[in-house]
C-alpha cells in the first residue's frame, strides 16, 4: 500500500511584506508584573538594538557607563487595552524588545532579551511565558484582537539610536545649565567634548569615553547595570521614581518645571539603562566601523530584506525637537509631590512657631520615656522569632515641614526595622533578593550583594504588603498594629533632636549610628581573581567618601547605635514606609533614607512617594502598636 502523503502546512512567511505581527494576550499574566493592578499599563515601548560589530563592545567601547551592551534604537509605542492585550505590527527580521509603560510613560518592567518576526509572521508571548498547565484564557475575546493591528507610533521623530547628546542634552541646555555651569561644587551639565571614564590600566589602555554632562547625571540614576542579575527582575525594580534624579525634579528642583517632552526624554533615557551613544561610529570611530557596517547592511539587505543604515540614522543630524530655550521657570517652586522644609541646622522655632520644652537633650528624652512606664516589650511571632519594641512617650514638636506636630498618646514602635526573618513568619515566599554589582560578571560571586539575609531588614516589600503584615500581626498577636504615621515616625526618630538628623550635623561622622551612602558604598569592586585594574572604572555613586560604616548594602538590623529612646536605624539602612499619603492622595511616603542615600538625602524633611503596590529595592518598614 502506498504511503499517504504527509500534510503540507501553508507557509507562514509572506516575503513581499516588510512587517510581522506581535500579539500579547494579557500583559499582566505571569510574574513580570505580579502585583501591578490592571489598568496601570497604558502603552508598550517598542525598541530594537544595533548590535556591536566584530572586535567592539564591552567596557572599552561602551554604549553607556555601566549601561547597555548595545545601542538602543527606539521604534515607538503601541497601545495596551484595558484587559492587558496588545496587537501590533513590528518591522520584520528586526530584534524587538518591549517595556510596559505607566500613565507617565515610565517603564514598569524591561525585556532584556529580544524576539524577531519574519515577514507576515505572527509572534506571541503565549506558549512560552506561562506554566505548562496554566491557561491565559480565550484569545478571541481580547480587546486588541478585535481590532486591526496597531501601527507603531514613532517616538519624537524617525527611528534612531538613543544618544544622550541628541536626546537629553537639549533638556539640560534649556533647563539646567543656568546653574550647573561648571561652578565648583555643582554637577557640570554643559555640553562639552567627551572625556575618558577612569584612567589607563593594564588591559584598559583606553577607557570608554562619554560626555561629561552624561557622567554627571548618570551618578543620580540607579539602573540594572551592564550585565545585571540574569533572573527576572521585580516590577518597578529600576523604575524612574526610585532614582534621586527624578525625586529631585519632581519636587521642582531650583524652581524648574519641565515640559512633558523634557520629562519624556529623561524618563526614556533612564528606562533604556542610561545609554550615552546612539551609534557605533560615535563610540569607535569611522576607521573601525565603516567597512563592517557596510558589509552588515549588505547582508541584511540580501538575506533579511532589511535595508537600514544603522550608523547614518543618528549622525545625519536628528537633533532634538525640544525648543532650544529655557523651560518656563515658575516664580514659586512647583507644587512638590513631597512636602519638604528648606530649613537648615538646629532650630526650635520655624515660621514663628514655638513649642514649650522643645527640643530636649538625651537625659530629658530618657526621663520622659521612663515616666511613661515600661519601656521595652516583645511580641512573639512564633517559631522562636520575636519582635522587639520600645515605648515612645506622647509629646509635641516642630516637624521638618515647619508645622507643630502632636503625638497625643504614647505608643510602641519597633526597635529596629522588620527583618527578613521576622517577615518570613508572615510570608515565607518573599525574597528581598540582591543588590546587583557593577559592570561585567564572570562568576556567581559577582552577581551582587545579598540583602535577603535573615537579620537584614526586609526590602522590596510594597506598602500594601507592609500593611498586610500589620493586619496579620494584629490577628495572630492580638495587638493593635499599624504602620507609623509620619508624625509618629519623626517623633520617635528625633528623640528630642531638632536638626536635620537625629545624630548631629552634616559634619558628624555617622559611621557608628547610620548606614548611609559612604566610602564602603561608593567603591567599585575589583573581584579577585579577575582583579579589575584599580582605577580603570572610577567610583561613581554619590557618597560621603570621608566616612566608612563598613556596609556596602543593608546591615543586620540593630547594627548601629540607637537614639535616646532605643530606636535603631531611623536614618539609613532601608527607608521606611509610613501610613501617610503623598499630596496626590494615591501614593504612600517612605522616610529616613537608605544605604543608597547620602546624608543630605536622609534628612527628616525627605519623604519618597511610591505607588502602594510598588516594591522598592531599598524600602522596608517598622511597626507601631497602641500603648493603651
Image (cartoon, helix red, strand yellow):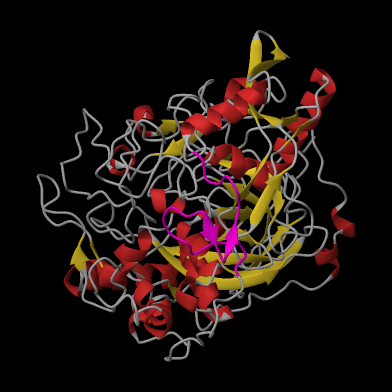
Query: Residue 583, image x and y in percent?
Result: 69, 63
Above or below 67: residue 191: below
Front one among 131 and 168: 168
Front one among 562 and 111: 562
Query: Residue 105, image x and y in percent?
Result: 62, 68
Q: Which residues are magenta?
A: 336-360
Query: Residue 535, image x and y in percent?
Result: 16, 47
The quadrant in which residue 491 appears is top right
**Residue that appears at 41% across and 61% down:** 274
**Residue that appears at 44% across and 58% down:** 273
> Could you tell me if residue 19 is visible in this image?
no
User: Which quarter of the rendered picture does the N terminus lie within?
Assistant: top right
Query: Residue 451, image x and y in percent?
Result: 49, 31
**Residue that appears at 57% across and 27% down:** 367
In the drawing, does residue 609 fall left or right of residue 542? right
Residue 192 on the magenta span: no
In the drawing, does residue 479 fall left or right of residue 56? right
Above or below 612: residue 387: above
Residue 349 on the magenta span: yes
Front one among 110 and 129: 110
Amino acid at each position: 500500500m502506498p504511503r499517504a502523503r504527509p500534510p503540507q502546512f501553508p507557509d507562514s512567511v509572506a516575503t513581499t511584506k516588510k512587517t510581522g505581527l506581535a500579539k500579547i494576550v494579557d500583559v499582566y499574566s505571569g510574574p513580570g508584573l505580579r502585583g501591578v493592578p490592571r489598568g496601570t499599563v497604558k502603552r508598550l515601548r517598542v525598541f530594537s538594538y544595533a548590535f556591536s560589530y566584530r572586535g567592539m563592545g564591552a567596557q572599552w567601547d561602551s554604549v553607556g557607563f555601566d549601561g547597555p551592551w548595545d545601542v538602543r534604537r527606539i521604534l515607538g509605542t503601541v497601545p495596551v487595552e484595558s484587559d492587558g492585550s496588545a496587537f501590533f505590527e513590528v518591522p520584520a527580521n528586526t530584534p524587538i524588545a518591549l517595556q510596559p509603560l505607566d500613565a507617565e510613560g515610565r517603564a514598569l518592567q524591561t525585556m532584556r532579551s529580544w524576539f524577531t518576526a519574519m515577514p507576515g509572521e505572527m509572534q506571541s508571548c503565549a506558549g512560552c511565558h506561562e506554566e505548562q498547565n496554566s491557561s491565559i484564557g480565550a484569545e478571541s475575546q481580547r480587546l486588541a484582537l478585535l481590532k486591526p493591528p496597531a501601527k507603531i507610533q514613532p517616538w519624537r521623530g524617525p527611528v534612531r539610536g538613543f544618544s544622550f547628546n541628541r536626546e537629553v542634552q537639549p533638556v539640560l541646555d534649556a533647563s539646567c545649565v543656568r546653574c550647573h555651569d561648571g561652578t565648583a561644587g555643582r554637577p557640570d551639565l554643559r555640553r562639552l567634548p567627551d572625556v575618558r571614564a577612569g584612567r589607563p590600566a593594564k588591559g584598559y589602555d583606553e577607557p570608554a569615553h562619554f560626555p561629561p554632562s552624561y557622567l554627571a547625571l548618570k551618578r543620580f540614576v540607579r539602573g540594572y547595570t551592564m550585565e545585571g542579575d540574569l533572573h527576572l527582575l521585580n516590577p518597578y525594580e529600576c523604575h524612574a521614581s526610585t532614582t534621586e534624579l527624578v525625586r529631585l525634579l519632581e519636587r521642582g528642583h531650583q524652581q524648574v518645571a519641565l515640559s512633558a517632552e523634557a520629562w519624556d526624554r529623561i524618563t526614556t533615557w533612564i528606562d533604556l539603562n542610561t545609554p550615552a551613544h546612539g551609534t557605533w561610529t560615535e563610540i569607535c570611530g569611522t576607521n573601525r566601523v565603516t567597512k563592517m557596517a557596510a558589509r552588515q547592511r549588505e547582508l541584511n539587505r540580501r538575506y533579511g530584506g532589511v535595508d537600514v543604515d544603522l550608523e547614518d540614522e543618528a549622525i545625519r543630524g536628528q537633533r532634538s525637537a525640544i525648543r532650544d530655550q529655557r523651560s518656563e521657570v515658575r516664580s514659586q517652586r512647583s507644587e512638590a509631590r513631597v512636602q519638604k522644609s528648606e530649613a537648615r541646622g538646629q532650630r526650635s522655632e520655624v515660621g514663628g512657631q514655638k513649642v514649650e520644652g522643645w527640643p530636649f537633650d538625651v537625659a530629658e528624652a530618657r526621663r520622659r520615656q521612663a515616666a511613661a512606664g515600661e519601656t521595652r516589650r516583645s511580641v512573639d511571632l512564633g517559631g522562636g522569632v520575636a519582635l522587639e519594641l520600645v515605648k515612645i512617650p506622647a509629646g509635641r514638636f516642630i516637624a521638618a515641614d515647619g508645622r507643630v506636630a502632636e503625638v497625643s498618646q504614647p505608643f510602641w514602635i519597633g526597635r529596629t526595622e522588620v527583618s527578613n526573618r521576622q517577615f518570613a513568619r508572615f510570608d515565607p515566599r518573599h525574597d528581598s533578593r540582591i543588590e546587583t554589582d557593577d559592570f561585567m560578571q564572570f562568576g556567581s560571586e559577582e552577581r551582587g550583594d545579598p540583602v535577603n539575609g535573615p537579620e537584614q531588614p526586609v526590602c522590596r516589600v510594597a506598602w500594601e504588603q507592609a500593611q498586610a503584615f500589620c493586619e496579620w500581626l494584629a490577628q495572630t498577636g492580638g495587638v493593635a498594629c499599624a504602620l507609623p504615621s509620619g508624625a509618629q515616625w519623626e517623633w520617635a526618630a528625633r528623640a528630642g533632636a531638632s536638626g536635620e538628623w537625629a545624630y548631629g550635623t552634616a559634619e558628624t561622622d555617622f559611621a557608628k549610628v547610620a548606614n548611609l551612602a559612604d566610602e564602603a558604598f561608593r567603591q567599585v569592586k575589583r573581584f579577585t581573581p579577575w582583579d579589575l585594574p584599580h582605577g580603570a572604572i572610577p567610583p561613581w555613586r554619590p557618597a560621603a567618601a570621608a566616612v566608612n560604616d563598613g556596609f556596602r548594602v543593608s546591615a543586620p538590623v540593630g547594627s548601629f547605635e540607637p537614639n535616646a529612646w532605643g530606636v535603631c536605624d531611623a536614618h539609613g539602612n532601608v527607608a521606611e514606609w509610613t501610613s501617610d499619603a503623598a499630596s496626590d492622595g494615591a501614593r504612600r511616603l517612605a522616610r529616613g533614607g537608605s544605604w543608597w542615600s547620602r546624608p543630605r538625602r536622609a534628612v527628616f524633611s525627605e519623604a519618597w512617594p511610591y505607588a502602594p503596590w510598588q516594591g522598592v529595592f531599598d524600602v522596608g518598614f517598622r511597626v507601631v502598636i497602641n500603648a493603651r
